[in-house]
Image (cartoon, grey):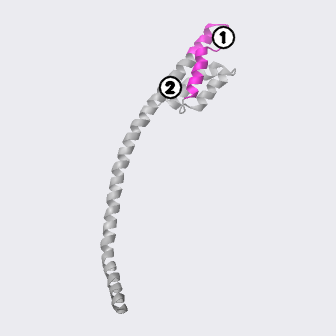
Amino acid sequence: MIEQLKSKLQELETIKQELQPKIDKIEEKKAEEIQELNKKYDHLIQDANVEVKNFEQKIMDDLIDLFSKVIMDEFEQKRSTSEYSLTDNFKEFKDSISEIEFFPKELVERLDKVINGDLIENVAYDLEKIKTEYKKL
């Protein structure tokens, strides 16, 4: 009885060894198909992300345009009066823009500096550099 079982176990081992190349070929085919499927879906995901990134950049461009307008409005206000003080619009803009997470913290800090006494001219003269750095579309 034990000898019969040993013989069957040996036969099982032989069958496994004979099937292994076929299993390896199936695994290889599976890996190729998975790779092709991943490529397809990676491409679709990238396409979707491009749309999101472009929309995000459009929002950033609009924010930078608004930033520039507020800076220039404040700069013009300062040039037009001898009794200059920051406008409420400037302060409200700084508070509002601070709440937008992806708005550059560096620019919020520039607004803070103006509120704390730095010259608006320092930001106004850097507007082209700021636009070049942050606007893309």
Q: Residue at x 55, y 28 (%)?
A: 130
Please give the residue where the numbered disc 1 appears in the rendered image: 84
Residue 1 pos. (x, y %):
34, 92
Q: Amino acid at mark 1?
A: Tyr
Q: Is residue 1 left or right of residue 96?
A: left
The label number, if any, that marks residue 63 in the structure image: 2
Secondary-structure class at tag 1? loop
Residue drawn at (35%, 92%), measured in percent from left and top? 3
In this orientation, does residue 125 appear?
no
The vertical placement of 43 against 18, above or below, is: above
Tell me where the magenta segment starts and ends, as one range.
73-99
Say which element carries label 2: helix
On the image, the x and y values in percent for residue 117 come to: 69, 20
**On the image, which quarter does residue 56 sit in?**
top left
What residue type is disc 2 on?
A: Leu
Q: Determine the residue positioned at 40% across, 39% down.
A: 50
Q: Nearer the viewer, residue 38 or 114?
A: 38
Near mark 1 (Cα within 10 A), the count class, few <14, some 14-19 or many ≥20, is few
Taking the image as shown, residue 29 lies to the left or right of residue 81, namely left
* Residue 75 counted in the magenta span: yes
Q: Nearer the viewer, residue 108 or 120?
A: 108
Q: Quadrant of residue 13?
A: bottom left
Q: Nearer the viewer, residue 70 or 100?
A: 100
Q: Position of residue 127 (x, y in %)?
A: 56, 24
Q: Which mark is residue 125?
A: none
User: What is the CA distance from the residue labelled 2 to the residue labelled 1?
Assistant: 26 Å
Q: Does residue 79 show up? A: yes
Residue visible at 62% across and 24% down in the picture:
111
Horizontally, residue 9 falls left or right of residue 81, namely left
From the top left corner, tell me how far across and down residue 74 is, in percent: 59, 15
Q: Is residue 65 left or right of residue 22?
A: right
